[in-house]
Amino acid sequence: MLKILYTHAEMFAARAAMQGTIGFVPTMGFLHQGHLSLVRKALDENDHAIVSIFVNPTQFGPAEDLSKYPRDLERDLAMISELGNVLVWIPDAKEMYPDNFQTWVEVESLTKPLEGEMRPGHFRGVTTVVAKLFNAVQPSKAYFGQKDFQQAAVIGQMARDLSYPTKIVVCPTMREADGLAMSSRNSYLNPQERAAAPVLWQALQAAVEAYAKGERDARVLVSDIENRINHEPLAKIQYVRCSDALTLADVEGDLRGPAVISLAVFFGATRLIDNISLG
């Protein structure tokens, strides 16, 4: 059974009436099977599951796609309703950012590289809205996908630093049959771009294979990924980086511990991200 709430007051009241553990999945809607896998895990591991749907304006830059971000609330609710007893919270921007809003949550070093470098202010919006969502929902566990690995790392840091009693659970990236990471933004791709986009996963997989055979030079791994992607005429690389899995600092020599290779690539106007863990 689906229960839908819209305001903080409704969310606070519903949460106060709940006994047991709460699994929480924050989303921006336009759900896909990746989101639904997180909701299923929340249901499996907790007494209750809560999903939020909110397209957060503060994590979009001036030149980004807030107005074009895909939305289909009716479809989202139909998909969630098939999973079982889930509470869905759908606040609007006025509810989340009332007049004279002036308080922000910022994580420092983890937000500087990668997405933080390319999208100034993005993570300030993410951490602020997730802090607000956590305050209202008070989840036992919160579920995020590995595709947004930096986001998950930043939120984990925030939760530790601000003493949230919430366990951050990072789940494997869900992929289409051809390897493309599931993303709401995939809907922007035209047929030619969609056919080209799996080159990202193919390039990352080649790096995994090279690593398994003993390659430890981050520069070699990154260069090979760039070369493979550059062979696809529709792909325009924004970045390919190898980062320390804990600090997210760039690794430019030999890998001496767990690392993540991440990338952001444009297909036309559509920006896709993906990553793979090593070690």
Image (spheres, rainbow, N blue to C red):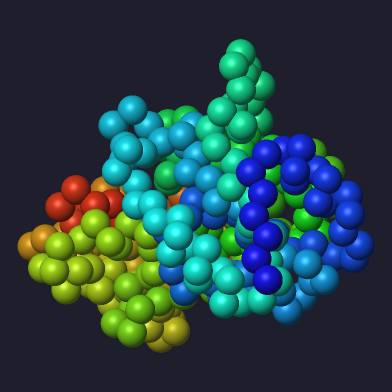
**Residue 167 spot, x, y in % from top left:** 77, 59
Give me the residue at 61% from left, 13% from top: 100
Quarter placement of the C terminus: bottom right
The residue sitting at 53% across, 33% down in the picture is 93
Residue 182 x %, y %: 39, 69
Q: Determine the image quadrant of residue 188.
A: bottom left
Q: Where is residue 19 in the image (x, y as percent from the top left)?
A: 91, 62
Residue occupying the point 73% across, 79% down: 44
Pick whichever, 199 or 191, lies toward us.
Answer: 191
Q: Is residue 106 visible?
A: no
The quadrant of the picture occupied by the N terminus is: bottom right
279 up-or-down from 142: above or below: below
In the picture, residue 106 is in which quadrant? top right
Q: Which of 256 and 204 is in front in this view?
A: 204
Outermost residue, top side: 100
Q: Foreground: 238 or 176?
A: 176
Position of residue 75 relative to residue 41, above or below, is above
The answer to whether 190 appears left or right of 2 in the picture is left
Q: Which of 43 and 195 is in front in this view?
A: 43
Residue in the picture at 66% in, 21% down: 103
Q: Is residue 119 visible?
A: yes
